[in-house]
Amino acid sequence: EIPKRDWSSDVALPISGWSSTLASPVVAPTDTTVYYLQTSDSICTYNDSLIVNTMECCSATITITNGNVSQLWAAVKTKCGNCADTTEQLTIRNFNGSIAINGPLTVDESFRIVKCTNITFNHAGMVDVIQNNNLSIDSSSVLKNCSGHQWKGIYSYDGLNTIRITSGSEIKQAETALDASIDTKVYLEKAKFTNNFISVNIHDYLKALTSNIYGCTFSCTSAADLLPPHTGSRTYAHLIIKNIASATVGNADRKSTRLNSSHVSESRMPSS
């Protein structure tokens, strides 16, 4: 039987008593390197493997890797004292520099982004809104990819969470710009969703969707030119709503939600 061991404490190869049969990994967004390891004693030769997933990191005025919103807020406060406040909740506003998020950004307390137009994510980047917190993105803020690869998007799976994307703010080049489930409250008001594989996916609610979705613009190019991991594809769907007791898109003012790429736009509701 191949001996098992915890490789997490080893920072480099070769590991004592083992030898590697593969060169160092090449860093690229989609590269996975497998190290084949071998050792022997007087009786047997043992083989094992170690899989290394490499991650391309993006740089900016502020760079956060596998962090949370309080870390991001503190970093912005250090760079621009007037650009971070706690008047109502943790808020960053009017930050003219660039922000790069590598890996997940955890929203573990309510957080607001106001007029920050250059927030970028690497291919593993995502915004993870955890239990009982709110995320607000407004005043023409922009969240987008930072390299030749789509980022993961915004995820919320809790009924005590509220997601607001408003006032011309834009989410672009994400695998799923917003994925909301388990009764998350969703307010999309005059938001923009651009060149995402899926723009908005709202699904699997235990009760009716609490939402206000109006005046939004969903767009993509006519060519099948999305970035990896959807190379050679066009936007699959702009708005998916499924497994929900009831949902309303639009408001009493009859302000429309516009789908301006009819060849790829798609809305899905459960059959009655």
Image (tube, rainbow, N blue to C red):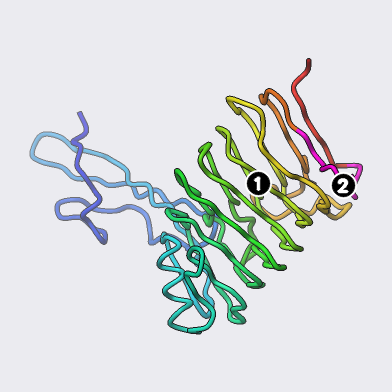
- Would you place residue 20 above or below residue 239 in this image? below
Which dot, 2 or 1, sits closer to the camera? 2
The quadrant of the rendering that contains the N terminus is top left
Q: Residue at x 27, y 47 (%)?
A: 37
Who is closer to the viewer here, 146 or 154?
154
State the count of labels.
2
The image quarter in which residue 78 lies: bottom left
- Would you place residue 173 above or below residue 249 in this image? below
Reading the image, the residue beneath label 1 is 176
Label at residue 6: none
Label at residue 253: 2
Helix, strand or loop under label 2: loop
Who is closer to the viewer here, 247 or 147?
247
Q: Residue at x 21, y 54 (%)?
A: 9
Dots 2 and 1: beta carbons under 8 Å?
no
The quadrant of the rendering that contains the C terminus is top right
Which badge, 2 or 1, is on the more N-terminal residue? Answer: 1
Q: Is most of the magenta stretch helix, strand or loop? A: loop
- Would you place residue 147 above or below residue 227 in this image? below
Residue type, label 2: Asp
Q: Position of residue 106 (x, y in %)?
A: 45, 54
- The range drawn in magenta is 248-263
Residue type, label 1: Thr
